[in-house]
Amino acid sequence: MVRHLFQKRVLGRVFIYLAAAVVILFTLFPIFYCISTATKTAVDAFSIPPKWLWIPTMDNFVNVYHTEGFMMSYLNSFVVAVMTTAFSLAFGIPCGYALARGKGRGTAAMGTYIMITRMLPAMGFAVPYYFIYKKVGLNDTYIGLVLIYLTTQLPFTAWLLNGFCRTVPTEIEEAAMIDGCTVFQTLIRVIVPVIKPGISTASVFAFMHSWNEYFYAKLISGRNTRPVSYAVHKFVNDVGTNWGLLCAASCMVAVPMIIFALISQKSLVRGLMAGAVKG
Amino acid sequence: MFQDAIRKGKRKMQRISNPPQGIRSDRWSYRLLIWPSFFVLFALTVVPLFINFYLSFTNTTITTLNKAKFIGLDNYIRIFTKDKYFGQACLVTLKLVLGTVSVQVFFGMLVALLWNMDFIGVRACRVLHLVPMMIMGIVSAFIWRMLLNTDMGIINYLLKNLGFSNLNWLGDEQLAVVSVILVNLWGGTPFVTIILLTALQSVDSSYLEAAVIDGADKFQIFFRVILPIIKPTVLLAVMFRLMDAIRQFDLIDSLTYGGPGTATTQLNLYAYSVGFGQWRMGYGAALATIIMFIILICSSILMNQISRSNTL
Amino acid sequence: MKKILSLILVLVLCLGFTAVQAATDASALDPTGVELNILICTQVQNDDLANTYLQKFADEYGIKLNIELAASTGYTDMLSLAMAEDVQGYDLVMVNSNHWGTLIDAGWIMPLDDFIHAEAEAGTDWYKGIMTAALDACVIDGQRWSVAYSAGVGILMYNKTMMEEAGIAEIPTTIDEVLATAAKVNDPANGKYGLSFRGGMERGITIPWLVNWLYEGGTWYPENADNFAIFNTDAALKATQQLVDMYNYAPEGIHSYAWQEAMTAMQQGMAAMWVDAATLAVNLLDPEQTSLYEQFGFAALDGVSSWGDGWCFSIGSGTEHPEWCWELIKVATSYDTALDQIMRGTAISCYRSDVYANEEIYTVLPEDLCHAVEKSAAMANIVYWPLISQSVEIATEMKNTLYAALTGQITPEAACEEMQATTIDILERDGVAYQK
């Protein structure tokens, strides 16, 4: 409905297309630059005036693929990201629902604490975690990484789903309760299907943040669990930063993320396009 | 007038956040739902928090981990009296956080309104707009460092060809702050857009129809109907971006390393350079604690706002 | 029968003889259950060393190596955390001047004097061919803590074409001459600048200052003056004045340059001269990176000591197998490894005079580069930060003060006074013994 209000005149339409073009140009130009550097040889990459047309080469991608440990780190990142997403959702969905509906200071206080943990500077955690993990033996494991990622991801997921849960009209829940469902059953049977777009949004974010996390990754991960964000960083060294390899690696790192986002985007968009939540 | 529409909308929001009697009596069950998350996070964070707090009262360095001395409030006193970089870092943090968040929310709102319209390719636009969010902080910093290079970057090249003069993006103290805000605008707006877009699409069209019938123009509709209804979501987006802006490290570190001199050294970066770079862990822990307090204050103000707007 | 027996005796004696000489060799050590953790900073030369030469050695002698190739960003954090007292995670580590302060202060690496003495007494080829600068990479209180591996010594890299076009006939040999030459070549209107160097990124301001200061004879451990608080010396003042002058001949964005941008400026033909680590020359000679790869010349500058960079090896003090670590260090810095790496193109310099005596390397490397490195390496002073854990803090304070001087907020004299005062503050605060 909102859209119809702003689309009266032809001039308006032209303006809209122009604005959209500007936004997309600004959004994609650096990406285009990254891809172009990845497919250029180093000589071309920085030539002034810049080369707009060039013969693309896949050498950089091939070299990245053959770089030792790079494909392994893909697997590491994938495992950690999936685990983090799973845990975030498993804990975050009930938590978000409770924050949305639960009244009472206990719930609110716990919610506040959960939110605050996300805001704490990573620096304050890194060193204590490093030594604790060394003592406990968790420092080169997947679960160790997942636990520390959860400190930032779980609050985020919980509060995001809190927002989504609030938009669900209470009539549906009331109906379920009248039919004899407990709160938990209401959650599983009624709320979860309704906020599916919210869940897919939250899972996209959880996966993405975990995939791109670098600060904790470099300190806590060991030889066997190096995630791909760390592997990309290895292309920046103190003697020769190979921009082409770096950009190629960045492209390869971003691709699974984009695919995952596209897949969940479909259900997300479908959920949104299915219409607003009518009152 | 369309005041009716607004009132209806607010009442609906009120009902959502103040559930009727039947559900309220299940307070215990809701607590049960939130306890697992709370316990997990509590267990994961309370020990490091205490360690951090304890460290802030000592003069620990990495070489004296087991032989640190307890020095009471010395670190804190030093921060507020003798530390010439602390004040500068606070100022820079203020500039960067305010600039980043306001710019992101403003443009995020505009773009969300744009994506909410119906035109050919809008769905592709929505998806494409998400891409910057998926790029790692360090990678986007490196890409922008290449783009913004004063002498060899493409942006200056284009500016020169259009007749403008060279801009020393990363080498000038004021422009470095602008550059950080610009890169954050590129990378962080998609998040705001997606949140706000979802909220916009959940606004019931009946209120808007009523407003149109009542003769309201576009701006009135936006400011008096839409905005109040989606205010909680906007505040939520502001809070998320605020938290990320205060905690931001990787991107600023790789883009400007704290800026020419200390022009973009915000509190987080400063605490890191002291606690990790110089390994003065006690002092760094004190700085981290101060950062936490600042965040606590800001967030409680914001959370107050959010809960208040939820119970109109 | 007797002939055969005597033959066998002679054979056994010969073997025994060689066995005696190999007493200082790896074959004398017991390889059972030896597992070494090694931390190496990833780059082409180091990766090649780890995967080809160290691995070959390990396979030959039957020991197990866990080599970690770590990214260079955040390397210092990783290293410090990993070598901390309770952890001592690595047996052999790659270090440079940024790390010695913390590692030595805390006692996390061991002195190597005994090993070096053994080699000196045995008169091995390894010892005879390696430059003293490599063994004396890090000397404090008469103890040696590291052996230098990659020779990133400071040399002058210049663009021959740009120099010719500006009518420069003689290559400068001191920093002052470099500045004078830069003034002549500098032509901003045509996009040509005299100098390229590290600017503001990552404490980069301090590097050119250190280069200048070392060439003027500066040292953190002066003979007749206090250690570390050296900013009241002529060398420090001269270095600051030279640094301020350098910024007149540099590209506009110099304040935000890290070594990558500095190098790109050279590769694009924007800047004529660059004084920096020789290991970076590999990027200037690579046809895949720059179209000007044939235009670069190299020379060593005169001076009491030149800036040296590059990676060195140290042995962790908690290791159970220091002898095996020492053997690995010898492999890394041996004649065969160094020559092989140069011939195969994975290294561009080394710290061995016997390699430089071998003229075969001129088929792979330009002659002037080899001469420049050889001359610079002989007088390299790699201790460009003080060997105390406060060195990082001193460096940060230097960076901020120098930035103020560069933007004209304070004079060079005031900058030196400020750096001196701040450094003494830090030393006093932490109770560091620096006064003589």
Image (cartoon, coloured by chain):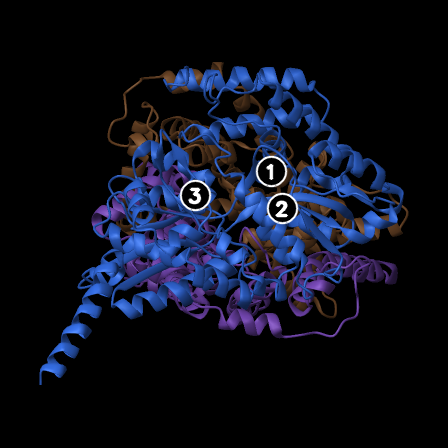
Query: At 67% from the left edge and 53% from the top edge, which residue is drawn?
Result: C368
The disc numbered 2 marks a residue on which chain?
A: C
Q: Colour of chain C?
A: blue
**In the rendering, what colour is chain B?**
brown
Which label's residue is closer to the chain start, 1 or 3? 3
Q: Is residue A118 above or below residue A2?
A: above
Q: Which residue is mark 3?
A: C76
Residue B218, image x and y in percent? 76, 49
In the displayed structure, does residue C216 sit left or right of residue C1? Answer: right
* Left or right for A196, reference B94: left
Q: Residue B276 in the image: x percent, y percent?
A: 42, 36
Instruction: Tell me, yes or no, whether dots 1 and 3 are on the same chain.
Output: yes
Whether residue B135 is visible, yes or no, is yes
Q: Which residue is mark 1?
A: C204
Give the structural element (helix, strand or loop) at label 2: helix
Question: Which tint was used for chain A?
Answer: purple
Give me the residue at 71% from left, 39% from top.
Answer: C254
**Residue at x-position 73% and y-position 54%:** C296
Give the percent coordinates (x, y) of residue B295: 47, 32
Q: Amino acid at mark 3?
A: Thr
* Left or right: C336 in relation to B113: left
Q: Local crowd at mark 3 within 10 Å, few (<14), some, or many (≥20)?
A: some
Q: Is residue B198 above or below residue C169?
A: below
Residue B215, visible in the rendered structure = no
Labels 2 & 1 near each other (Cβ < 8 A): yes
Three-letter amino acid code of the residue under disc 2: Trp
Same-subunit check for callouts 2 and 1: yes
Identify the residue under disc 2: C259
